[in-house]
Image (cartoon, rainbow, N blue to C red):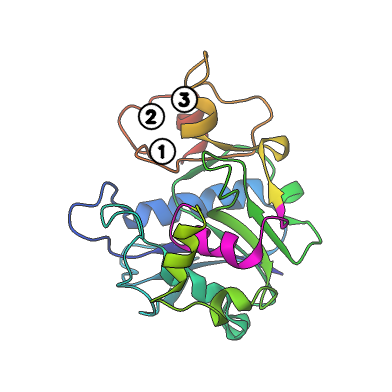
Amino acid sequence: MISIVTFKWTPPNGYRSTYGPETVNTLRRMVARHYPDPHRFLCCTDDGTGIDAGVEIVPIWSDLAELPHPHSEKHPSCYRRLKAFAPEMREVFGKRFVSIDLDCVIVSDLRPLWNRSEDFVIWGGTTQPVTSYNGSMLLMTAGARAKVWKDFNPRFSPVLAKKAGFYGSDQAWIRYCLGGDEARWTTADGVYSYRSHIAPSPACGRMPADARIVFFNGKRDPWSPEIKGYDWVQEHYR
């Protein structure tokens, strides 16, 4: 049985997005509609208030919680998610798991994405072609890329990834540590970025016909006033 893992922690004051319990509950419902195979749904969080009973709450760890984004303290820092690569997380997440961000809209069958055989798959093909990986979604056999956690040094690793030209916090280190040849989901698999693929198109806001999931990596969220009015968001983000 696969585990679906998401993260919700209290953001720093002034952060651009607010992730309430309904964002977790909505993601769980979307997953249930579009991934009919047996699965667990887990949320790693520092506040489980208001989260549905069908969600397994995992108290989130404090490891790397205070480590800032290497490019700007105003940007989100997700280094604490790197612990998902630790072999011991198999005891928490199970043998096989998907890590997925809350700010997405699932619109179609996820089985072609999540029922793959590789021991590691990560989303790619967004706005940082050099970085090439985006941490919004990854699929992993627990412990398969343990060096991402074991080799991380909070003093030196962010600097190394930044000097190599990779953007982001956890995703930059993943790219630096693993190289650029890992299996990836792209638009060819129906995985889209609203910011990179939908907003810039002539049909701004129109969902691609082959989409399976749309991520809102950036300043817009599915619940943003200018986004939630789209027909496809109203239909699927519930």
Q: Is residue 178 magenta?
A: yes
Residue tagged by mark 1? 222
Mark 3 and mark 2 in contact? Answer it, CB < 8 Å. Answer: no
Helix, strand or loop at label 3? It is loop
Mark 1 and mark 2 in contact? Answer it, CB < 8 Å. Answer: yes
- Badge 3: few (under 14), some or many (20 or more) residues near its Cα, within 10 Å? some
Where residue 234 sits: x, y (%)? 45, 30
- Looking at the image, which residue is at 35% across and 79% down? 62
- Looking at the image, which residue is at 46% across and 25% down? 199
Q: Is residue 38 magenta?
A: no
- Looking at the image, which residue is at 72% across and 40% down? 189
Question: Which image quarter: residue 85?
Answer: bottom right
Q: Is residue 21 left or right of residue 145?
A: left
Residue tagged by mark 3? 199
- Badge 1: few (under 14), some or many (20 or more) residues near its Cα, within 10 Å? many
Q: Is residue 73 left or right of residue 233?
A: left
Q: Residue furthest top?
A: 202
Q: Amino acid at mark 1?
A: Pro
- Give the extent of the magenta segment: 167-183
Residue tagged by mark 2? 227
Q: Amino acid at mark 3?
A: Ala
